[in-house]
Amino acid sequence: MTAPTTEPAPPHAAPPARPAHTGLLRATAVIATIGVVVALVGVAILLLPVQTPTQDCGTSLGYLLDGRVDVLVSETDPPAGITPAEAKANNANPCRERVADRTKPAAVLIGAGLVAALGAALVEGTIRFLTWRKRGARRTGPDVATEPTDRTGDAPRPDPDPSPPAEA
């Protein structure tokens, strides 16, 4: 049976510094995710097909990028398979107007999503940078500057060989 030791317990290491504003960092991640999803919904709206009774306009994005033109139909002599009412509806609301009606809300969604995502990224980056600088300033005291630190810079490294140096 061994006798109990009377050596004091080793001092506990200081707890690692918690990052500041964890709630705010979570909020920025959620806002950035929502912003990306909103922007993707806007892109999806641009990729939906648009058509008139007489013309297949393609997608809004394709129509705008290709520079397509409207095909107007004679209301008095419509092509085969097209009624005069369909020809009148085509001419009253051609591809150009239909694409514009779809592109405006898509552009708003893309813009709002990008602003939200980039704003959240900017806020999070600023918080992380300021927290990093604050921790760096804490470690620049006279004791810390001369002591070696471990890889993370959080605590002094223990001496690997605690025995006194041998005399020659």
Image (tube, helix red, strand yellow):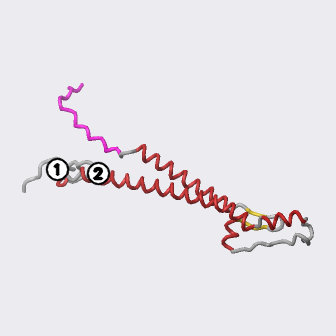
Question: Is residue 85 rendered to the left or right of residue 149?
Answer: right
Q: Work out whether residue 130 or residue 51 is closer to the camera in this orientation and state it.
A: 51
Secondary structure of the residue carrying numbered label 2:
helix
- Residue nearer the viewer, 74 or 102: 74
Query: Residue sitting at 50 percent across and 48 percent down?
Result: 30
Q: Residue 42 location, x and y as percent?
A: 62, 58
Q: Is residue 104 above or below residue 8?
A: below
* Amino acid marked by disc 2: Lys
Going from N to C along the chain, the mark reached first, 1 or 2, is: 2
Amino acid type shown at disc 1: Asp
* Measured Cα–Cα span from mark 1 to mark 2: 17 Å
Residue 113 horizontal/vertical position (percent): 55, 56
Residue ID for mark 2: 134
Query: Does 122 sit left or right of 93 as displayed?
Result: left
- Magenta: main secondary structure: loop
Rendered image: mark on residue 14 = none
Q: Quadrant of residue 20?
A: top left
Task: Place residue 146 in its image quadrant.
Answer: bottom left
Q: Position of residue 67 (x, y in %)?
A: 69, 74
Q: Position of residue 142 (x, y in %)?
A: 16, 52
Residue at image coords 58%, 59% = 110
Quarter in which the C terminus is drawn: bottom left
- Stretch of the chain drawn in magenta: 1-18
Q: Quadrant of the N terminus?
A: top left
Disc 2 residue crowd, few under 14, some 14–19, many 20+, Cα 10 Å: few
